[in-house]
Image (tube, grey):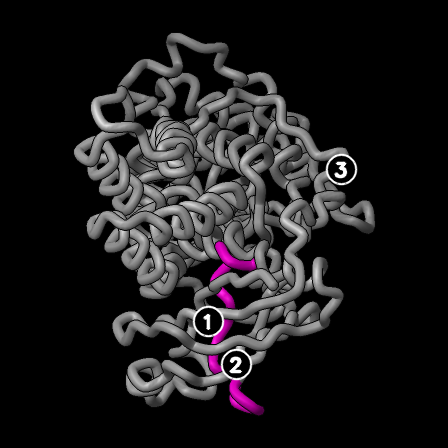
Amino acid sequence: MEKFRVDIVGLHHHDVRSHDREYAASAVGLQLVLQPQPENVKDPYAVRAREGRKHVGYVAVPDLDVVYQALAGSGLQRLRGVVVESNANPPVLTVEADVERIDWTYEPFDDSVYAGWHYDGLPLMPRRMEALGDLTADLTDALAAPPSPAGAQGCDDDTLRIMTESLLSEHLYDLSREMTRARYRLERLLAARSEPFLQDAAHQLRQQKGMLMRHENRDHVARYLFIELPTQLRQGGLEESHYTYDNRLDELEQQLRAFPWQMYDKFLADPVDFLREVYYKHVPRRHLFPLLSGIILMILKGRVSIGRWGREGDTEPIEQIRSLTPPLSPSAREGAMKAAIRELLAKRDALGDLVIAQKNQWAGIICILRFDYGVEADDLRAFCRMMADWGFGRESGHACYCDYESVSKSSDYATTPFNKWRGSGTAHQRQVRAATELRTILRPKIGYR
């Protein structure tokens, strides 16, 4: 028989949520069933822990490998174990189970979803994660090696102490599959040692399994990856020392959008929640790092529009990401605006109809130029003269040229910020369409201000 231990986390979400700490404090000796949950939409590899019909929590992600390896080796469909240790804050249960055989070579995760996916942009592997990978390998080797004879060269206690302290402070920065596996192995190796400080490190790793998915930890990691790291790269002269990829940004963005499970779109929706998705999808390092590299490149190029930051909707990180957008020269900025307007005037919808079909829709265009991008003129008539100077007046050849008489009839739209527009009906929808379509075209070219 082979014994193994796994930790149960997430007690505050399920049937014991109203008394999760009290439940954990008195849980030693309870028998739990570990049941795979392939129908789980969020994580099809999730393993539910239950006491009778009571849903207690889930096996911690770093421990999923050994559960599936035990199931594969024993031929069982579910496992039974006993709570041998518990921690009340955060609530974490350690369950010990035994099976006839564990198939340590079994690979439970199906990576066929990545077949054909590639990213060939600038590699920007986060140095912190690279260093963590080295630390993990070195610590594993040191703990797995047989004890050195007295007086022999080896890894002394001070070195082991420094390495374990670094691991405990840094491992949350890497949610890749390889790191989750490394946590499990390191915990077993640490627990097998007799030194009290290594035993304590094993206990802290078990405690932290209940913290891996806490919002504050994900927020901290997201700030490092998507604000601190891009800032460091910008300050380090990344733009001057590497090929800029400016002529391939559309292509690279399409590669990112092709990543399985719409992960790039999830990043744009909420970078903090994106990290939870990475964790649930068990993304391996060889795919995670290209994804992160592409995201960081898009941040540096001003190509991202973050919908929300965390459950509190913090706006400061979004503003910090926006501030990383490289400023355009005034002439380049004006050129980008002209190109965007030309593109808008030529754009057709799915039915083949022009998006800008009436001259009064210039009111919506002027609104975005004024309030989103700070294009100034003394009054509405002067603004229309400016548009004529830009090549969009009566002599331009455009069917829907900028005409003051037409725009003045919809002046409320031109002189009111878009987020304060109120109205309904076909005429209102035409103005909304003009404004939103111009925003969609302008933002990748200029950014968001």
Q: Nearer the viewer, residue 346 or 195?
A: 195
Residue visible at 58% across and 77% down in the picture: 80
Check residue 32 in the rendering and tell me which mark sits there, or answer none: 2
Label pair 3/1, CB-CB below 8 angstroms:
no
Question: Marks 3 and 2, how far apart in space?
Answer: 37 Å
Place of residue 392 in the rendered image (x, y in percent of width and height, measured from the top left):
56, 29
Instruction: Specify whether residue 382 is in view.
Output: no
Q: Which of 84 and 358 is in front in this view?
A: 84
Q: In this view, does 239 lie to the left or right of 291?
A: left
Q: How crowded is mark 2: few (under 14 residues within 10 Å), some or many (20 or more)?
A: many
Q: How crowded is mark 3: few (under 14 residues within 10 Å), some or many (20 or more)?
A: few
Magenta region includes residue 54 = yes
Q: Is residue 95 above or below residue 413?
A: below
- What's the residue type where badge 1 is placed? Val
Q: Which of 291 and 22 is in front in this view?
A: 22
Q: What residue is pinned by disc 3?
A: 115
Furthest-right residue in view? 351
Place of residue 400 in the rendered image (x, y in percent of width and height, measured from the top left):
64, 39
Looking at the figure, which quarter contains the C terminus? top left
Place of residue 255 in the rendered image (x, y in percent of width and height, measured from the top left):
65, 33
The span shown in magenta is 51-64
Label pair 2/1, CB-CB below 8 angstroms:
yes
Furthest-front residue in view? 150
- What's the residue type where badge 3 is placed? Ala
Which structural element holds mark 3? loop
Looking at the figure, which quarter contains the N terminus? bottom right
Q: Residues within 10 Å of mark 1 (few under 14, many from 20)?
A: many
- What's the residue type where badge 2 is placed? Leu
The earlier-in-sequence mark between 3 and 1 is 1
